[in-house]
Each structure stands twice: as C-alpha cells, then as structure tokens.
Amino acid sequence: MRGAMLLRRGLALCSLPALVALAGCASAGSASSSPPPLASAPVIEAKPAGVWRSGAMVAAANPLAVDAGVEVLQAGGSAVDSAIAVQAVLGLVEPQSSGLGGGAFMVHYEAATGDVITYDGREVAPQGATPDLFLNPDGRPMGFIDAVRSGRSIGVPGAVAMLEMAHREHGRLPWGQPWRAAERLAEQGFTVSPRLNEMITAAVTRGGLPPEAAAYLTTDGKTPLAVGSRLVNPRYASTVRLIVARGAAAFREGPLAEEIVAAVRREPTPGTLSLEDLRAYRPNRLEPVCGGYRVYLVCGMRPPSSGGIAILSVLGTVENFDLAAMGNTAAGWHHFIEAQRLAYADRDTYVADDRYTQVPLAGLIDKDYLRSRARLIEADRAMRTVEPGSPPGAKPRGRDATGNGTGTSHFVVVDGRGNVVSMTTTVEGLFGSRRMAGGFFLNNQLTDFSFRPVDDAGAAIANAVAPGKKPRSSMSPTLVFRDGKFKLAVGSPGGNSIIAYVSKAIIGMLDWNLSPQQAVELPNLIARGPIEAETSRADPQMLETLAGMGHVFRTGRNQGEVSGLHAVRVMADGRLAGAADPRREGKAVALN
Ligand code: GLU
C-alpha cells in the first residue's frame, strides 16, 4: 500500500521493514533523468519511528553553521530546514569546502513514514564538454592544477537546486527563513577562524585567489585576513536575498546566471558552460543504495556517487570476519585494509554516472560476490596485488586513477521529530576552481572525471567525460538502521579517501563498540594504493605489525589528516550522541 502510494507520488522509495537486516534495497529512482531500474526493486512496508524522544542534533564542520542549524530547529524547522541553514552558512564561513557554487548529496530519513530517500545535487558537465576536455592538443592529460584553475573544471552547480527540492518535500518553515543567519553573517560579518585563515593562506601561496575574492583578503588584495579579524561579504548577502526571492531559478536565468557563465568563460582556458546548461539543470530524487551489515541496514548514495556502493563493498567484505572479536588491533585493521583495497579496485573500475555507463550495482554489493572477494584475504599477510573482481553483471572496463580533492564538508541533522539528514557537500578542491560569482566560489567538480577516456590497454574508462554527464563522486552520506529504526548518520569529506574514513567510523561504532566521538578519532588508514596512515594518531607498534604483514605505506604527501567526519548515533538509552572531527573546527550540539 505504502509503496504504491509513494510510487503514485512519483517518489523513489526505500522504506524500512521491521526486519531489514538482510534486505538489499538498491533500486532505481524515478526522476526524469534517473538511471534504468535494477531487476530486483523491493517494495517494502514502511515502519514509522513512532514517538520520537531522542531529542535533536546538529553536527557540522563550523560552529557558526551548527548554531544556524540549531536556531532553525529551535524555531520548529525540520532537519531539511536546518540543513539549508547549515549549508548557507558553510558557504560563507568555510568557502574552501562547499557552497552555493558546488554540488551535494543528501540522504533523508522521514520518521513518520520510515522512508529513506536521497537527493542528488551533483554538478553536470556542460553540453560543450567532450571526452578530450582535459587533454592537451597532443592527446596527453592536462596538468591537474591547470585543469582545476580553468573554466573547464566548472560543472553546473546543483547544491541550491537540491536543497530547494528537499525543502519542497520536507521543509516546515518558509523557504527564506533558514537563509537568514547566512544573510546576517555575510552582512554584519563574522570572525575569521584559524582554519579559514590557514586555507586562505594555502590558496594564496598556491596560485592565489582572484580579485573577486577580496572579502577574504586584506585591502592589499593578496594578504589573507588574519585569525580573529572580521570578514564581511556583502555580495554573498545579496546572493542569499536573491535565492530567498527566486529560489534555484536564480541560477537558471538572470544576473547571477550571467555572472556564472562569464566567470567560466573567462581566459585563461575558458570552459563552455552556457546559460542553456544552467537552465537545463535539475536535481534528482533517487533511491538509496542499501544493504545489510550484520544486524544493521546501511543506506547511502547510489551513482553518480561511488560512496554508497564502496561502503557496502567494504562492509560486505569484512562481514565475513569477526571484527568485533579482533577488536581495534593490527588484526582488525589488517582485515579492514584488505577489504578497502578490494573495494577500491572495484569502485575505480566499475562505478560512474549510471545514466551513461552500465554499473553492475547489485553485483558489486552482492553478498556471495563479496564472500568470494573476502576469500582472497589471508589472516596475517597482505595480498600481494589486488585486481578488480568480476561482479555479476559487469562488463570489462579500464581502471582509472582519478585524484583527490580537499574541498568538501559533511554534516548531520536530526530534528525533534526524528527526521534525519546526512549531507555531504562540495566545491571539489580548495576554493573550487578559484573563480567566483555572486560572492561564492565556483566548483571544479569536473576534474573528478577521468582525464583519459581510455586506459593504457585501450579499454574505455567508465568515468570518462561526456556532455550532460556527472563526474563520479566518493561522497558517502550514510544512514544506518536496525530493526527498521534509525541508529546512526555519518559522512566525511576527503575525496576518494571518504570511503576509508566513513567505513572506519561505522566499523568503530558497530564492531568495536566505540562512541561516535571515539570512532571519529580513530586513526585514518586509507588503502587505495600504498596505505596512507595518520601517523599522529596510529599506534606505531600497530603500524609496524602491519608493515611486518607486508603492507606498504606511503611516505610524503598524506591524506590521513583531512577527514571531517560528523556523526550522530542513537545510544542504547535512546539519547543522541554526536561527534565532530577534531581534524576540523566544528562541533556537535544536542537539543533535548
Ligand atoms: N569531489 C569529491 C567527490 O565528490 C569530494 C572532494 C572532497 O571530499 O574534498 O568525491
């Protein structure tokens, strides 16, 4: 009944049954440009949360953004209303990571119905983007930084359109209300935090910021605003007013749209993004990809993100081992590392925008397939090499080696009715493309595509550029349920390391029985290639044991420290416990 009703409403659905642990739920969305349906789309009876007594929570990477989200909840707003406020402020106070010129994914749980839905606000390649977008005339890939800081890297922004869609369906307050804090802070100013100062300094040293970033610099136009100084961004305030008045239409036509196009088309290396591309953008409502993990159901983003699939692939692999008994030890980490290596190999090979490429989604998270992958793992020795597997339904593909960004943020909101938002939002790299419009930075998301359309052996790469295509993401906003009830929300920035960060936090909480904060603070060990270990947090003895098993560690540049995990968990006593990653500057605030 419920399923039929949802389908009539045109909603994709993944409702939670009483016993869901083993129920895979990976089926197609219904938005116009959504991917083709998978064979096994279950229609499951919803299990509403009943009376919610656990209170509310906001956890995000910046205290001002958390305060804005809390203010909205206190005014009676929903989790989505609060998420709008958090994003609006993050775009101002943490512009290096996310904002109005970027894209985002949201996983939403509606307590009254038990429905889990995802919103896809991923950037889209303009119609003028061709497979050689990031190739030099000699056919070789452009330098990464040259590509990032060009108009070619800028995809059609989707974050605001996505928030508007989510608000239409789950907002309780008028659209304009959650934007107020951002407008106020942009107009009256806010205090520059140590991290913002550090990021501006990094940008200034590495290639600089454009003249239109004057708000973030002193009057000489090149010195970063000092920690503690006041930052005012009136352009951002007027953009917020425009968005309040016109919604996402402000991005589709009119002066802001024209300004975006002009910024993209500027020399050097202009892009092709046009008013027509902006007009054509629509966010998507998609079904989550869900799968059982021990007694839990884990739900995340389907393509164009690889996040949901890869998290389930890691978890479905380690599920074959007793991680709880191994505990937070070298043995436990060894199995987790090996599961990561296997999952990354598959993810790198098979996952891309599934409106353009056949993605063997069900095969990649199939329990029998993952059991066969888990058999490759030896108890005390690292696998010598790791190859992508042949999941059911897969076609041969070239493996791509797309790089990593540092411009992303993750936050979670639980409102007083038990509705939950887990949202990861991004401009891709540090301050995105470094080009601006309307007081915000424009993304460089298209550098998440493979620069090369074929690999060395000439095999087509799934994540190659195409007009209208979305670059593959690693963003992994995740929700976890048990017996149909919401249990935890988590996610992180960190480019493709997100998969390692988020699965670490889930294993820490569910297998090692850590609090959200303890799980977030576990060391980061990323095993996509040679392991990047967060040596400042990892036990040196354990790292030595792992090296003794044959694990190879990367030296030099290390991604280990850039997670920004934010989480909330319903504890055994029914209360919410939140976590904010100490590697960033945020906080988790509970309202009871
Ligand atoms: N653009 C990346 C993605 O979508 C995220 C970059 C980051 O986390 O910094 O996967």
Image (cartoon, rainbow, N blue to C red):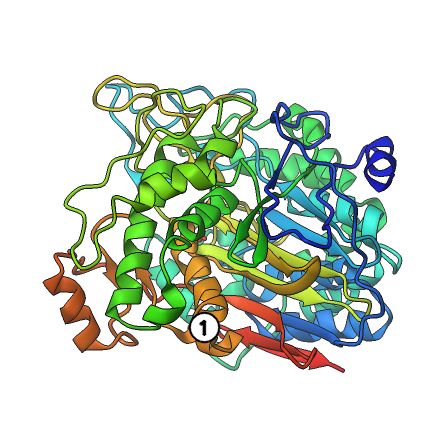
Identify the residue at image location x=49%, y=42%.
Answer: 309
Q: Which of the two residues, 268 or 96, is positioned nearer the viewer here?
A: 96
Rendered location of residue 335, percent (x, y): 29, 58
Q: Amino acid at mark 1?
A: Ala
Identify the residue at image location x=73%, y=55%.
Answer: 18
- Label 1 Cα crowd, 10 Å radius (few <14 / some 14-19 / many 20+): many
User: Is residue 325 shown left or right of residue 553?
Assistant: right
For the N terminus, which image quadrant?
top right
Rendered location of residue 392, percent (x, y): 43, 27
Residue 378 vertical position relative to residue 248 in the rendered view, above or below = below
Can I make out residue 574 in this image?
A: yes
User: Is residue 22 shown left or right of residue 129?
Assistant: right
Q: Which of the two residues, 426 or 254, is positioned nearer the viewer here?
A: 426
Residue 474 vertical position relative to residue 201 in the rendered view, above or below = above
Residue 551: name its quadrant: bottom left
Rendered location of residue 178, percent (x, y): 79, 62
For the C terminus, which image quadrant?
bottom right
- Residue hosting label 1: 519
User: Is residue 54 shown left or right of residue 399?
Assistant: right
Kind of element beneath mark 1: helix
Identify the residue at image location x=23%, y=41%.
Answer: 386
Can I make out residue 527 in this image?
A: no
Residue 53 vertical position relative to residue 379 in the rendered view, above or below = below
Rendered location of residue 139, percent (x, y): 26, 19
